[in-house]
Image (tube, rainbow, N blue to C red):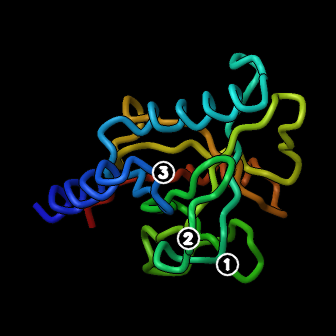
Amino acid sequence: FLDFLDRHKQLSEWTADLNTPKVTWISGLFNPQAFLTAVMQVTARKNEWPLDRVVTTVDVTKRGPEEIESAVREGAYVHGLYVDGARWDTSSGMLEDAHMKELYPKLPVMLVKAVPVEKADSRDQYLCPVYKTQFRGPTYVFTAGLKTKKDPNKWIMAGVAMLMSVVE
């Protein structure tokens, strides 16, 4: 029920002035894929790029949603994601091994933006699948490149993913 109230609050604030919110609670959206597509479309149109040659990239910040002062000019700040099978180390800005008994650590705010395919850099990144729920499979949303110094195969073998909703 609390999620419902939070969703209502977010949508009410968003539609009150019809401006892009400073930070979007992406987990609270019914169709997060549509939001991500809109980010790509707005950027592609603004820069006159063909939409089929644009991909999303993410930059994980060190800030929480309350610390964001204004909306970003290109892309969108999003929050509400959890890591399953690892954790995000804010001091190093990288994916690290999970702490014991910490099942679903929360990610800080992420900047999601669109870039041309040619400029997408996947070096030192784990291409992390993002799912709506812990059931994964049919709840796939998109793939986010998370910085790591470790071999991405380590995270693949560990089944690391980001989740929008967890039941603890």
Residue plotted at (53% across, 61% down): 85
Residue at the far front in the pictured view: 17
Q: What amino acid is found at the position of numbered circle 3 in the picture?
A: Thr
State the image coordinates of residue 62 (x, y, percent, origin top left).
Answer: 65, 76
Q: Residue 2: give x, y in percent of width and height.
A: 15, 65
Asked where in the image residue 30 lies, by quadrant, the reply is top left
Q: How many marks on residues?
A: 3
**Residue receiving disc 1:** 90
Residue at x 53% of width, y 32% of height: 38
Q: Secondary structure at mark 3?
A: loop
The span from disc 2 to disc 1 (Cα, nearest Å) is 8 Å
The residue tagged 2 is: 108
**Dot 3 surroundings within 10 Å: few (below 14), some, or many (20 or more)?**
some
Residue occupying the far left of the picture: 1
In primary-sequence order, the first of circles 2 and 1 is: 1
Q: For the residue carrying disc 2, how many other residues have a C-alpha within 10 Å: few (<14), some (14-19), or many (20+)?
A: many
- Provide the residue designation for mark 3: 20
* Of the pair 84 and 68, the residue shown nearer to us: 68
CA–CA distance in space, label 3 to label 2:
19 Å
